[in-house]
Amino acid sequence: MKRLLVVLSIVALGVCWLSPPVAADATWPFEFARIEYGVLTPPHTDVKWDKMFDFDIYHFVFNGHTILNAYVGNNPEYPSISKRWISSKNRDSVNGLPAETILSKSSSATRSRETLITLNLGSHICCQYIHFYYESDSKADAAKAVRIIASLDSLLPKWPKASNPPR
């Protein structure tokens, strides 16, 4: 029994040792369904997909909690933040796409954000907008969410097709 435990420990140590560590700035591509756009996500980020009849909602989950949501469709509820909570608004584009962003901060040092992006119409006429939003994120989670939003880009012709598109 002890011999088996030693052998298993050595095998486990070898696997961990030979596995390359994930760089702190590593990212993984994620493709949205029905549109030719994708984002880069931090390692260990799961994306859950709620497919509706004429829109999709994506939940970017990091360490067990949602750090960002994305509505992809034609009729976003934007803005959904009450006007009294808005701390700033801007119309900075995201990778050349027209965008409008609303930011708010709470007294508990959490952050909320909504970014509405108008997609270039092409073969994905079914979905004209991506509405990214998060509520009550910590500073670190908000920073991850902002990097995901800023990475939005057209998949064609830049990205190779992902091996695991969402289903």
Image: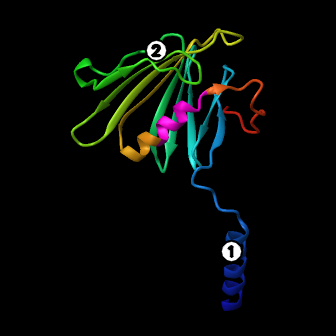
Q: In this view, does 14 lie above or below 165?
A: below
Q: Residues within 10 Å of mark 2 (few under 14, many from 20)?
A: some
Q: In this view, does 18 lie above or below 89?
A: below
Q: In this view, does 139 lie to the left or right of 87?
A: right
Q: Which mark is residue 12?
A: 1
- The color scheme shown is rainbow
Mark 1 → mark 2, Cα distance in angstroms: 48 Å
Q: Give x and y (percent) for residue 100.
A: 44, 18
Residue drawn at (58%, 11%), measured in percent from left and top?
128
Residue 56 in which image quadrant? top right
Q: Give x and y (percent) for residue 120.
A: 63, 12
Q: In this view, does 167 lie to the left or right of 107?
A: right
User: Which portion, as a residue range, is magenta?
Assistant: 144-152
Q: Give x and y (percent) for residue 142.
A: 42, 40
Q: Residues within 10 Å of mark 1 (few under 14, many from 20)?
A: few
Q: In this view, does 108 lie to the left or right of 130?
A: left
Question: Looking at the image, is mark 1 or mark 2 earlier in the sequence?
Answer: 1
Q: Mark 2 points at which residue?
A: 76
Residue drawn at (54%, 24%), measured in percent from left and top?
94
Is residue 149 within the magenta segment?
A: yes
Is residue 49 within the magenta segment?
A: no
Kindly check if marks 1 and 2 are in contact, taking CB atoms under 8 A apart as contact.
no
Q: In the picture, which quadrant includes the N terminus?
A: bottom right
Residue 55 in which image quadrant? top right
Q: Give x and y (percent) for residue 67.
A: 45, 40
Question: Element at badge 1?
Answer: helix
Q: In the picture, which quadrant includes the C terminus?
A: top right
Q: Report the amino acid beneath label 2.
A: Pro
Q: What main secondary structure does the magenta stretch of the protein show? A: helix
Q: Report the amino acid beneath label 1.
A: Ala
